[in-house]
């Protein structure tokens, strides 16, 4: 009798297959762990792929020191539960210059995240890095390969990517070159939520609505997560029921007003909502339509 | 027929739990869209995303702004702008790569590969089609079947896409005329039959206006009685489900060995089903065992099917590693090292016949060489053209030789075990995709039968270590004489030996062979194989053959386990051998009665570094035999 696999089962199998190929062919793989919901799913799939062994690679968190406190809590807890080594990288130059989201805007993201990621990968000598990006997130991502090759300087050339046929991945690379691997390429946002529910995957509570202290600034709801938040004259945090659709540096991440306190309600809101996921991120809006593609060429992700 | 609908807003709002349960049970169909530059492909995909509410307000706002700025439909929304992703191609107004899009209906989730239509990007279409269950071939109702239509259909069929959909688009621009549609379908049917497409479904649509996309018939095409495009895509059977009824195939990706108590084999099941207790064969070793368990994060599972990524444990301690295939014990796949296949060249640098490329097939990676193509296929006319090489986007048929046998199935039977890529060893670029037709070895159905008694056990029983003493030298150099003495000495020492003599073998095993270069090579190949079998049986094998060519002696050396092949050069100068001429052969060769005689009119290639060299002008045959036996003793400490 034919067994009918659901789309989630097919996606899960594809992701696990990709991860095993990388472990079999790369010298020194790592999983980029951002503590977001996509990272949570990716980590869960890695545990499934290599069970009963722990995933045979470490987690790397490229930290900006400005993430939500709840993210740091889950990060340490999740790594321990998976039995994996957690590496945290802070760009020493950004730390020394005191780069922060209040004074430095785009430079903050560039130095802590983009430069920090390159430094972290170079520092540990990783030649393959799993990332949680999905093709449905943004137009230029729709064409990203599962195995994305980066030059020794981490550059991405959209015109010079390897064709990927069937489920055969060419993981060979020259000295100094590295691969970014995206096992969640074919997942959509709804698939991610559905899978989190079906598998009972732990995520940062900030994805669920709760009363939190916020200020409204430039049309964005920002959560005052610690006392480093610089309040402008006359600004007063107020308690509002909010949740986050994406998580990043707390002073740069806009919340949405919501009463959705359960996963089902979040998914319901997501399906009925009319703005896309990345819209809450300040970094994409700065340079217009081609901004993500430009960031990729510079080495972000 | 019912009207398919997209994500049901009402259900989401009223009963999210019910909605999620429904969504969770959807299956997944992958398809490609192909068409020429102006066939409206991106518009159609944009329409599918738009109708399935996969476009958010901010995307839509950007789309409306873009439509006004660079759109081609005046003030109306240009859906194509939703799909054309990369900045460079947005400026050019054409898609240049494969983009993947996602949408869902109430029944199914879909992954669409959007592939470009113009010629220089054949490789993108092949890439997008390689994972597709179905192909939607777009035709402009005003233009009918074009060269590109034929090319796309041929490529989709070549890569094995099961279901073809002919979407006759822009029906609005021909006044929804039934005759126009019927003429295009008839035209296509004739062409499709010619290239072996036996079945296709034709649907008249307008991607721009939305006719027959989600519901059929549209009010504009009352004459059309078939399904809408979406309803048809929802009803197609999935290739992955058909694979379940084939024999088990699981290419091993990775051996999971967290501790001494657990050894699991991780892989994606390509075909068949697996259950604890099933007999399996490891290919190529041929060893058999039984599936002990199917391990998952959620505990041991009672069964697994094609399409699932699993970890299997086996009941026996058998050798099995990445590259091996765990297969049904009764119906395993073949192994071979020579194939005929179709190649699609994907790189700017053309094929160099004879060069070594990496060939990756499933989890096996080996060096492979490609012969000069038998022919190239003109994708427009489908003519076979003579070709010395294959350039970017060329498709040809050629012989492929791998350095060692690989486990495979014809592509028509298995995309996983029949499809491969070629990788340039210098640049690491993926330069070609290949599809195996069949192996070129007559022995394609002969499997290695694993034997349970290891070679070492047979030798141990004889209290010796096997060896092949390979004598080489000119005719009349003294090979047979000395070999015979060595044999007798070893026999007296209670060693198990066997002497293979050139003249004797030519009376039996090799009596069909003459003395041409090709026959001499075959002579040595056969003797080498026999020596290998005897050494495998634990014997000390002594061979006495002229074996004039270095390459063949090295070929035999490669057959024998390292250290067990001992090359003995009986070094007698030609003048001395000719002066002895005990059989009168040199005399015959000198007057031309014997052709291809080594040393006279056929070369003797001296060994460069033989294990033993015997100078017969400096010692007697007995002294030589003693020296050779001593060498055997010295090398091994004892003659074991």
Image (cartoon, rainbow, N blue to C red):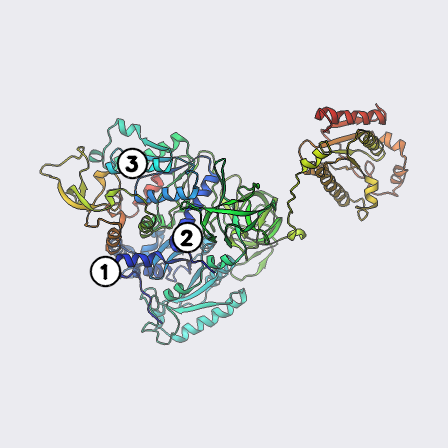
| Mark 2 vs 3, N-terminal side | 2
> Any mark on residue B14, and which?
1
Subunit ID for the residue under disc 1:
B
Element at label 2: helix
Closest to the observer: A290 or B473?
B473
Q: Which residue is mark 3?
A: A110
Subunit ID for the residue under disc 3:
A
> Any mark on residue A10, and which?
2
Closest to the observer: B187 or B110?
B110
Distance between mark 2 and mark 1 Cα atoms = 29 Å
Element at label 1: helix
Q: Is residue B433 visible?
A: no
Closest to the observer: B54 or A59?
A59
Q: Please tell me whether residue B500 is drawn above or below residue B135 in the rendered image.
A: above
Residue at figure coordinates x 27%, y 35% from the top left: A72
Image quadrant in which the N terminus of chain B is located: bottom left
Q: Are marks 1 and 3 on the same chain?
A: no
Subunit ID for the residue under disc 2:
A
Closest to the observer: B226 or B67?
B226
Image quadrant in which the C terminus of chain B is located: top right
Whether label 1 touches label 3, CB < 8 Å: no
Q: Position of residue A253 (x, y in %)?
A: 23, 42
């Amino acid at each position: 009798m034919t067994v009918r696999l659901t789309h989630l089962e097919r996606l899960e199998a594809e992701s696990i297959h990709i991860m095993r190929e990388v472990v079999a062919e790369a010298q020194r793989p790592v999983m980029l762990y951002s503590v977001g919901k996509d990272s949570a799913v990716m980590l869960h799939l890695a545990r499934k792929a290599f069970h009963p062994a722990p995933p045979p690679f470490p987690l790397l968190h490229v930290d900006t020191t400005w993430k939500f406190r709840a993210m740091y809590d889950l990060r340490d807890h999740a790594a321990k539960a998976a039995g994996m080594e957690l590496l945290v990288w802070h760009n020493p130059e950004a730390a020394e210059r005191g780069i922060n989201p209040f004074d430095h805007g785009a430079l903050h993201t560039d130095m802590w995240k983009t430069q920090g990621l390159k430094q972290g990968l170079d520092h540990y000598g990783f030649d393959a890095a799993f990332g949680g990006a999905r093709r449905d997130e943004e137009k230029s991502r729709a064409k990203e390969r599962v195995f994305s090759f980066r030059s020794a300087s981490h550059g991405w050339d959209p015109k010079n990517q390897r064709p990927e046929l069937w489920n055969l991945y060419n993981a060979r690379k020259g000295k100094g070159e590295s691969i970014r691997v995206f096992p969640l390429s074919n997942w959509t946002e709804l698939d991610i939520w559905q899978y989190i529910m079906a598998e009972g995957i732990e995520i940062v509570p900030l994805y669920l609505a709760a009363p939190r202290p916020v200020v409204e600034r430039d049309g964005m709801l920002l959560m005052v997560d610690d006392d480093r938040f610089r309040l402008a004259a006359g600004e007063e945090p107020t308690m509002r029921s909010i949740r986050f659709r994406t998580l990043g540096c707390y002073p740069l991440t806009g919340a949405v007003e919501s009463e959705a306190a359960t996963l089902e309600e979040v998914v319901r809101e997501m399906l009925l909502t009319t703005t896309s996921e990345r819209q809450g991120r300040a970094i994409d809006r700065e340079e217009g339509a081609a901004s993500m593609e430009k960031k990729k060429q510079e080495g972000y992700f | 027929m019912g009207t398919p609908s997209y994500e049901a807003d009402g259900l989401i709002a009223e009963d999210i739990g019910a909605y999620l349960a429904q969504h969770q049970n959807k299956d997944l169909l992958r398809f490609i869209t192909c068409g020429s530059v102006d066939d409206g492909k991106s518009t159609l995909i944009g329409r599918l995303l738009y109708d399935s509410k996969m476009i958010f307000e901010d995307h839509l706002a950007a789309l409306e702004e873009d439509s006004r700025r660079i759109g081609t439909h005046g003030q109306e929304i240009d859906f194509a702008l939703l799909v054309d992703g990369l900045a460079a191609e947005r400026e050019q107004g054409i898609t240049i790569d494969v983009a993947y899009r996602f949408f869902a209906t109430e029944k199914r989730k879909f992954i669409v590969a959007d592939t470009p239509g113009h010629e220089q990007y054949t490789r993108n279409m092949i890439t997008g089609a390689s994972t597709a269950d179905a192909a939607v071939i777009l035709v402009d109702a005003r233009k009918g079947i074009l060269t590109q239509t034929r090319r796309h259909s041929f490529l989709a069929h070549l890569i094995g896409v099961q279901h073809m959909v002919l979407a006759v688009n822009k029906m609005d621009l021909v006044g929804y005329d039934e005759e126009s549609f019927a003429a295009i379908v008839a035209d296509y049917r004739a062409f499709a039959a010619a290239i072996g497409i036996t079945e296709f479904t034709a649907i008249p649509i307008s991607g721009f206006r939305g006719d027959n996309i989600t519901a059929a018939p549209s009010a504009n095409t009352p004459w059309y009685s078939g399904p809408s495009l979406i309803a048809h895509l929802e009803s197609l059977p999935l290739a992955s489900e058909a694979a379940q009824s084939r024999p088990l195939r699981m290419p091993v990706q990775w051996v999971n060995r967290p501790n001494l108590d657990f050894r699991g084999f991780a892989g994606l099941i390509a075909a068949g089903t697996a259950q604890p207790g099933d007999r399996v064969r490891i290919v190529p070793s041929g060893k058999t065992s039984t599936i002990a368990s199917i391990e998952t994060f959620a505990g041991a599972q009672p069964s697994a099917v094609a399409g699932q990524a699993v970890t299997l444990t086996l009941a026996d301690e058998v050798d099995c590693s990445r590259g091996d295939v765990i297969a049904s014990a009764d119906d395993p796949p073949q192994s071979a090292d020579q194939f005929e296949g179709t190649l699609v060249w994907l790189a700017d640098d053309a094929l160099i016949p004879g060069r070594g490329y990496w060939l990756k097939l499933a989890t096996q990676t080996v060096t492979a060489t490609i012969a000069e193509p038998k022919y190239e296929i003109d994708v427009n006319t489908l003519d076979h053209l003579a070709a010395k090489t294959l350039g970017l986007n060329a498709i040809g048929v050629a012989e492929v030789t791998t350095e060692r046998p690989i486990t495979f199935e014809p592509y028509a039977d298995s995309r996983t075990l029949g499809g491969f890529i070629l990788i340039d060893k210098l640049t690491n670029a993926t330069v070609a995709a290949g599809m195996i037709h069949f192996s070129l070895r007559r022995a394609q159905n002969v499997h290695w039968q694993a034997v349970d008694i290891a070679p070492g056990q047979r030798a141990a029983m004889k209290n010796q270590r096997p060896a092949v003493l390979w004598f080489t030298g000119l005719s009349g150099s003294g090979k047979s004489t000395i070999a015979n003495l060595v044999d007798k000495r070893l026999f007296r020492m209670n060693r198990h030996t066997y002497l293979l003599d050139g003249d004797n073998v030519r009376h039996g095993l090799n009596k069909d062979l003459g003395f041409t270069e090709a026959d001499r090579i075959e002579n040595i190949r056969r003797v080498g194989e026999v020596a290998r079998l005897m050494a495998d049986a634990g014997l000390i094998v002594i061979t006495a053959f002229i074996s004039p060519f270095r390459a063949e002696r090295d070929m035999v050396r490669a057959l024998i386990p390292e250290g067990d092949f001992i090359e003995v050069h009986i070094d007698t100068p030609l003048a001395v051998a000719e002066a002895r001429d005990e059989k009168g052969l040199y005399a015959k060769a000198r007057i031309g009665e014997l052709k291809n005689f080594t040393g006279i009119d056929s070369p003797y290639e001296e060994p460069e570094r033989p294990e033993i060299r015997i100078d017969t002008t400096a010692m007697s045959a007995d002294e030589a035999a003693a020296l050779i036996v001593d060498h055997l003793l010295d090398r091994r400490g004892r003659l074991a």
